Amino acid sequence: MNELPPPLARCLADLLGDGWLTDADVLRRYGEDNSRRYALASAVALPRTAEDVQMIVRACAQHGVPVVARGSGTSSTGAVIPYAGGVMIGFERMNQIVRIAAEDRYAVVQAGVINSDLQNALQAHGLFWPPDPASADISTIGGNLACNAGGPMAVKYGASRDNVLALTAVTGKGDLIHCGSLTTKDATGYDLTHLLVGSEGTLAIIVEATLRLLPRPPHRASLRALYRDVASAAAAVARIMAQPVAPSMLEFMDHACIRLAREVGGADLPDAGALLMIEVDGHAETLPHALEALNQAANGVGVIAIDEAPDEASREKLWAARKSLSPALRTIARGKINEDVVVPVSRIPALVAGVEAMASEFDLPIVAFGHAGNGNLHVNILFDPDDAGQSARARAALPRLFALTLSLGGTLSGEHGIGVAKRDFMADAFDAATLDTMRAIKQALDPHNILNPGKVLPP
């Protein structure tokens, strides 16, 4: 941790008052994220307004001091770890839902609004914001946008990038920019809005967002399909997504995840090689036909049983168990490399087969679950960090997973982002000219390289 230049520290302390924090416990808390990495910033800033953020960035730019914007620290890629020190900006004081325009189906929110708080506020209007990551109860809208978070409903409704209309953000020069509009159609100028979404705070710091809202579906129904093995379930995913009825959720669990959902999450599940959780939403009149179409597509070689959820309580319990899977994996092993690779849906069988082969080759538990309808699987490489051999094999398995994914026409991340965990593999996903173009954009918006330095782009 480097000390801040005294003039900068005095300036920001005067600006923020009790929102300028340098206590060691605070610095440690803000220096961590869900990746279990940590580093210490020199200070934590808690702004109340977009203008506060602008002043912080301008002051830091003048002194060449790094700035890292942080939501709730749910990143699994080390995206908000302040490795270069500097100032960490927390957004818990910028947590206002500014406006809900139900008639135009948009909401304006500050970056620190918690996802679930927004969803609760929208219920009275019969609306919802589609991104629903497993961390929705604690993750912020700003953090969701920074890494283009998705969740189970992205298969039908899209991820964060597909559900944002406009942004207000602060560039690395301290300029306050406004991009996008209140309209769902906009062909005016460069699309800076969607450029900033998923940029992990490296191009600009999002301070306010105008979000696209959708009517809350009046009814929903679920199917649970059990399979003899993961190959049969993976083949069923390809069949489901090849037919006309779009599921609103389509989740995959392998055998280890089924056991965890039963033993740790309390789900009422029999033993099976793999499971698909299939949901459809819409009007009561059309749901039976949609369920029948999905049932037929799910049925095939290797199926053990396909059942409709008997009631809402059963459905909720199963989905709650699904959301608890990631933390529950640490009951199998203390070490976990959690990746969220994506492939075209038709290539899921090949991805799953490749992951199974890797588990055997590296002699490690490698479990998979996630958003099968998008081809986005969370592949978890489990190991004992105190065992040097297991740790080395886990590190060796990671590039093999990425190589397999890219060979299938996929990419490194569907919703977790790059951070530092996958930064050095970007050169495998993109050619030199493409990476140079990304660096040129970074230079244009952050000429002093102070915004979340060292993330996303390889050196």
Image (tube, rainbow, N blue to C red):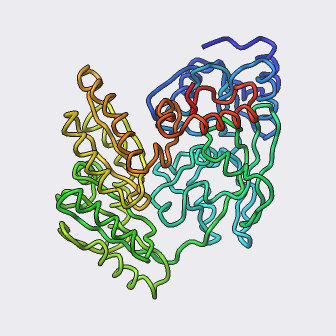
How far across and down, in percent of the image, does residue 400 sit?
33, 36
Please indicate, yes or no, whether residue 311 appears anywhere in the rendered image: yes
Q: Is residue 384 left or right of residue 6?
A: left
Residue drawn at x 68%, y 30% as measured from the top left? 451
Q: Residue furthest bottom?
A: 285
Quarter of the view holding residue 227: bottom left
Figure label count = 0
Q: On screen, 8 above or below 436?
A: above
Q: On screen, 80 above or below 226?
A: above
Residue drawn at x 80%, y 33% as measured from the top left? 174
Please indicate, yes or no, whether residue 33 appears anywhere in the rendered image: no
Q: Quadrant of the N terminus?
A: top right
47 and 348: which is toward the camera:
348
Residue drawn at x 39%, y 85% as measured from the top left? 289
How far across and down, in percent of the image, does residue 273 sit?
19, 56
Q: Is residue 154 left or right of residue 166?
A: left
Q: On screen, 363 above or below 163?
A: above
252 and 89: which is toward the camera:
252
How far across and down, in percent of the image, does residue 311 sit?
34, 73
Residue drawn at x 31%, y 74% as measured from the top left? 297
How far across and down, in percent of the image, does residue 109 sit?
70, 53
Q: On screen, 13 above or below 427?
A: above
Q: Quadrant of the C terminus?
A: top right
